[in-house]
């Protein structure tokens, strides 16, 4: 599947039902990369690294990109999983595949809530 950027151009928002269709290709989840500065989400790649590459090609800066997994069938805190290899950034203080800074996690939740509709 082609990587799509949600939050810009014609792809301003996406519905959970559309995420569910995407997840059919990958099991029960959709991998995504979020640019917390531009307030956009790339989805549809096999890996967050694929989505990260598309965002970088479109002018995003590495320091603003974070990988997440979205589970369209789940609600609340279980909908977003903060886990990706692209999050490993020891030089920038993030030493895990998760997102250690609670402010960044909150910003990602707000972006996801604004761009993904029920």
Image: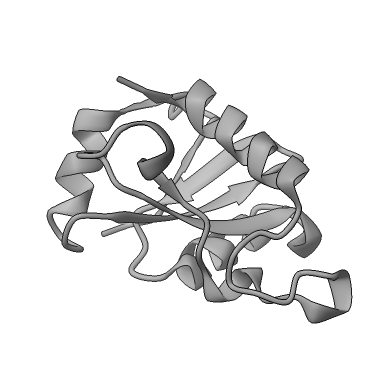
The percent coordinates of residue 60 (x first, y second) are: 72, 53
Q: Residue drawn at (65%, 45%), measured in percent from left and top?
A: 105
Query: Is the N terminus in the top left, top right, bottom left or bottom right quadrant?
Result: bottom left
Asked if residue 65 lies left or right of residue 10, the reply is right
Residue 66 figure quarter = bottom right
For the point 29% across and 47% down, which residue is it?
Answer: 71
Is residue 91 shown above or below 103?
Answer: below
| Colour mapping | one colour
Place of residue 67 in the rendered image (x, y in percent of width and height, measured from the top left):
55, 60
Residue at x-position 57% and y-position 67%: 53
Please report the residue visible at 64 percent of the width from the left and 68 percent of the height from the top.
87
Q: Is 52 drawn above or below residue 5 in the view shown?
A: below
The quadrant of the image that shows the C terminus is top left
Q: Residue 99's spot in the image, x, y percent?
A: 65, 59
In the picture, measured across the screen, residue 17 lies left or right of residue 57, that is left
| Foreground pick, 51 / 100 | 100
> How many numbered discs?
0
Q: Is residue 72 above or below residue 16?
A: below
Q: Is residue 111 above or below residue 78?
A: above
Residue 80 placement, left or right of 37: left
Q: Where is residue 114 shown, x and y percent of the image? A: 52, 22
């Amino acid at each position: 599947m082609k990587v799509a950027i949600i939050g810009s151009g014609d792809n301003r928002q996406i519905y959970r039902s559309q995420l569910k269709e995407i997840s059919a290709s990958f099991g029960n989840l959709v991998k995504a990369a979020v640019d917390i500065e531009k307030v956009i989400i790339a989805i549809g790649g096999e890996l967050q690294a694929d989505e990260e590459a598309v965002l970088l090609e479109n002018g995003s800066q590495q320091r603003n990109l974070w990988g997440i997994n979205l589970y369209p069938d789940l609600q609340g805190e279980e909908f977003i999983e903060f886990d990706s290899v692209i999050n490993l950034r020891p030089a920038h203080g993030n030493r895990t595949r998760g997102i250690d800074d609670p402010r960044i996690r909150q910003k990602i939740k707000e972006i996801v809530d604004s761009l993904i509709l029920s």
